[in-house]
Image (cartoon, helix red, strand yellow):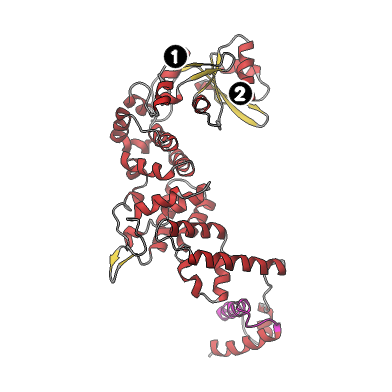
Amino acid sequence: MKTNAVKIVKTLRSHGFQAYLVGGCVRDLLMGVEAKDWDIATDARPEQVRRLFKKTIPVGAKFGVVIVRMDGKNYEVATFRRDLGYTDGRHPSAVRFATPEQDAKRRDFTINGMFYDPARKKVLDFVSGFKDLEAGVIRAIGNPEARFEEDKLRMLRAMRFSARFEFPIERKTICAIKQHANEIHEVSAERIREELIMILTQKNPGIGLELLDKSGLLKAVLPEVSKMKGVAQPEQFHPEGDVFTHTRLMLDRMKDPSPEFAFAVLLHDIGKPGTFKVAERIRFDGHASLGAEMAHKILRRLRFSNRQIQVICALIKEHLRFIDAPKMKQSTLKRFLRLPEFELHLELHRLDCMASHQDLSTYDYVKKALRRFKSEEKKLKSKPRRLLTGDDLIALGLEPGPVFKELLLAMEDAQLDGKIKTKEQALRLAKKLSKKLTR
């Protein structure tokens, strides 16, 4: 158990206040899972909490919430409260400080509504959370309609908990989610993004995707992904089924993914529905380029950072290039291997193969080429310096212009292919090529 969290509880108790561990950390403690966040509930008012601890941040003092910092970590200390109405689908318009029982009944799901007294090692359960935890059920506290009316984000949180713990969602709770799924847009794009990231980067992201789909939330927040359902693929390459099934299988094969990689997996075939055609077989010509364009719009909509968008869209745009890798010239292959975050490109390709035909021959080829290339660059201690510069081309009597770039690129290709190794060889080749390019 987190020592600092218990220390905060004991400090509050020693000054005459009630105090308990509360929420997800209690749930995780009872499940034998290591908790990431430790929250405390108390009858001390925010100003009283701030007087008792050296480092505090009044992040939501009007809602009774104060952050206590210990050893560089944040611990949320909240005053028992009941909420008086919601106007924005997310935050209470006003609160009244209350009893532990009233506080428990305003929370989201029964398994998150329990208190724990670390001194007596006793659970305080006003919402039958322990019973649902033992049964393995996600159930809204009280009336599901009211809980989701108060905070629309709870609908996505239900998906996250259900997928993470593999607990089914209780009938009335899932019915309320289906009925109100389209209201999720009352929540900010940033909060939706963060919940989606947690669903995709935790345990069982494929189950999370299925739950989002069945609840109607996927169509509401990511309609482009929903459209992948039922889009057939050529059986010789994709015996697993449609584009949606392929994507789900890839998600479940990820290992500790970053948010960028998880979204690249989710969206890598987003362009397939829009490029589907039947010729000699089912084809999706240009789906990688279209997918990158679509992903850019989706990621902007979800308020991802420019850097994240750049990484994700590059992974999507380049993911088909592996098909041509064994036939690439050495210069082309080396340029490919120099793509930023290339290890992520390689892992995306591996998952793409494993969730379809399971032929890893191209993956193995590129991985060996990457090891060889890294070894070569390590010996040189850096990227090989160009044999020629713009000044050298001017010395040959050429005028700066479009030909310069073309010549320098041709020189670099010849160097990477091993056709030229000295400046003299480069100058001879440059003279020869410049005559052809300037005719």
Answer left or right for 386 relative to 45. right
**Residue 45: percent from the left, percent from the top?**
56, 15
> Please, what is the dominant secondary structure of the magenta stretch?
helix
Q: Nearer the viewer, residue 34 or 158?
A: 34
Callout 2: helix, strand or loop? helix
In the displayed structure, would residue 325 be above or below residue 31?
Answer: below
In this rendering, the answer to whether 428 lies above or below 154 is below
Q: Which residue is mark 1?
A: 101
Amino acid on which the number 1 mark rests in the picture: Glu
What are the residue bounds of the magenta stretch?
401-423
420 drawn magenta: yes
Residue 168 visible somewhere in the drawing:
yes
Task: Indicate which disc residue 5 carries.
Answer: 2
Along the viewing direction, whichever of 149 and 33 lies nearer the viewer:
33
Tell me the element at label 1: helix
In the depicted view, which residue is nearer to us: 76 or 26?
Answer: 26
Nearer-N-terminus badge (1/2): 2
